[in-house]
Amino acid sequence: MKRLCFVCGSRNISHDMSVDAEEELYDMQGIVHDWHCRSCGARMTVFEPLRKSIKGEYKVEQISHDIADDFLKQHHYLAQQGNGFLGKVHYGLFTKTNHIVGVIVFAGISVVETLIGAFEGFERFSDQSGFWELTRLSMDDELKEPNLTSWFVAHAIRDLRKTQYVRAIISYADSRYHHGYIYQATNFKYYGLTAAKREFFEQLEGGEERLVWRGSVKDLKGEWRDRSRKHRYMLVYDKSLKIKWEEENYPKGDNDECELKAATSQLNIFNYLS
């Protein structure tokens, strides 16, 4: 199974050595793998936990919009801010005792301009079937298993491809909150940040405000603010699609715990998405 360089994205990776180790963050035994990239020279050290298979401990099932909504209201930062979500196909991650611990939501692409900007030859009235957006991904905060989220993502996508027509899947990571490490770990390709835009917030009585999505704001009291930019990730399964977006190296930040989880996940999950 080919590995992927976390720096340049090359698959020209060489395995140097593996040693037994103990990872303090998750309090478990495991193996440390040392790799180096022959293309850019980067060296990578990845901890792989030794644990019984996730299979049998968890299961992934399609769920209703209401069940997904109830879970997201408790665990997802956008739902906690009062933001709703579009959803067509919803998946739940369940323990073997049928306790829901994760939710993934897929929807159609919300605006056709996304597809026009992403693919050559795509026009406003082109067929949009087969194009999906992963609009929500949320896990129970108490979960500590480092590769469970990517296992969930991989199995949800695998089932989506079995039950739906899938040409490509797009997902975004809000740059205010995270870099999208889970998409890096599950082999999405990265296509940079969305364009800089501004949005209008109307000032309401009592000091409250609301975001104005559409329509004229000429006579409204409020202010324009910079919209946070989103990291763009995409998986393309239809090889006839020609991508206009320019692929870039994965963004990295200072969140070492997220990087560890993503790196560990990539060891275990790569084959599911190919």
Image (tube, grey):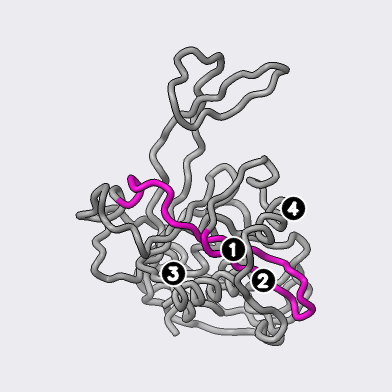
Circle 2 Cα neighbour tier, 10 Å, few/some/many (<14 / 14–19 / ≥20): many
- Residue 93, numbered circle: 2
Which of disc 3 and disc 1 is earlier in sequence? 3
Tell whether position 108 is magenta: yes
Q: Is residue 190 left or right of residue 221?
A: left
- Outermost residue to the left: 121
Quarter that holds the N terminus: bottom left
Answer yes or no: do the residues labelled 2 and 3 have beta carbons within 8 Å? Answer: no
In the image, the segment drawn in magenta is 88-115
Tag 1–tag 2 contact (CB < 8 Å): yes
Q: Is residue 165 left or right of residue 78?
A: left
Q: Amino acid at mark 4?
A: Gln
> Residue 69 at what x, y percent from top left?
67, 55
Which type of secondary structure does the marked residue at label 2 adopt? strand
Residue under label 4: 74
Residue assigned mark 3: 5
User: In front: 65, or 184?
Assistant: 65
Q: Residues within 10 Å of mark 4 (few under 14, many from 20)?
A: few
Residue type at mark 1?
Answer: Ile
Residue 248, by quadrant, is: bottom left
Query: Residue 3: image x %, image y %?
Result: 45, 77
